[in-house]
Amino acid sequence: MAYKRKKILESDALQRLNIAPDDAVDIVAGLWMHHPRFGIGLIEGVSSANRPLASMLQSLGENQSARYQSMLARKTVVQVRFLHGVRMLTFTDLFEVQKKEEQLPDFYQVQSEERLAELL
């Protein structure tokens, strides 16, 4: 399984995205992720407190908006389909449980659906 995962991540099928913990609200369904404990999976759904408050954020100043964005990022929950099943991961599961940067999840967007299908 590790060989298959390595082959997928090193192929041209996926492109790595940098999503910092404070930008967790930028995670969207359709992205792929590699979690250090659970492996590679497809993000099927995202829920976050920022959806209803987006209009309020626009009316705030930049400093306040960034502060609220960071706060709302911590409310993000993602539904991920891993090879072993579906998991709901909270912000804590994604970013705070792991202490070292190399243990944080990596996010990817699909570059080549055909190539990804061949590798899966």
Image (cartoon, rainbow, N blue to C red):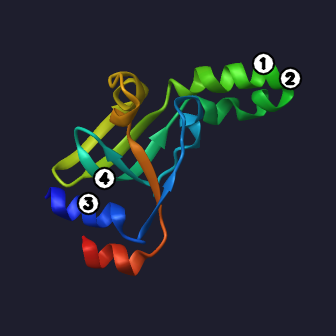
In the image, what residue occupies the spot 19% across and 55% down? 83
Of mark 1 and mark 3, the one earlier in the sequence is: 3
In the image, what residue occupies the spot 23% across and 42% down? 38
Marks 4 and 3 sit apart, C-alpha to C-alpha, by 13 Å
Q: Amino acid at mark 1?
A: Gln
Q: Quadrant of residue 89?
A: top left
The answer to which of 10 and 119 lies nearer the viewer is 10
Q: Amino acid at mark 3?
A: Lys
The residue that label 3 is drawn on is 6
Tell me the crowding category of disc 2: few under 14, some 14 to 19, or many 20 or more residues within 10 angstroms, Cα based: few
Q: For residue 41, which numbered disc appears in the image?
A: 4
Tell me the crowding category of disc 4: few under 14, some 14 to 19, or many 20 or more residues within 10 angstroms, Cα based: many
Marks 2 and 1 sit apart, C-alpha to C-alpha, by 5 Å
Of mark 4 and mark 3, the one earlier in the sequence is: 3
* Residues marked 3 and 2 touching at CB (< 8 Å): no
Marks 4 and 2 sit apart, C-alpha to C-alpha, by 37 Å
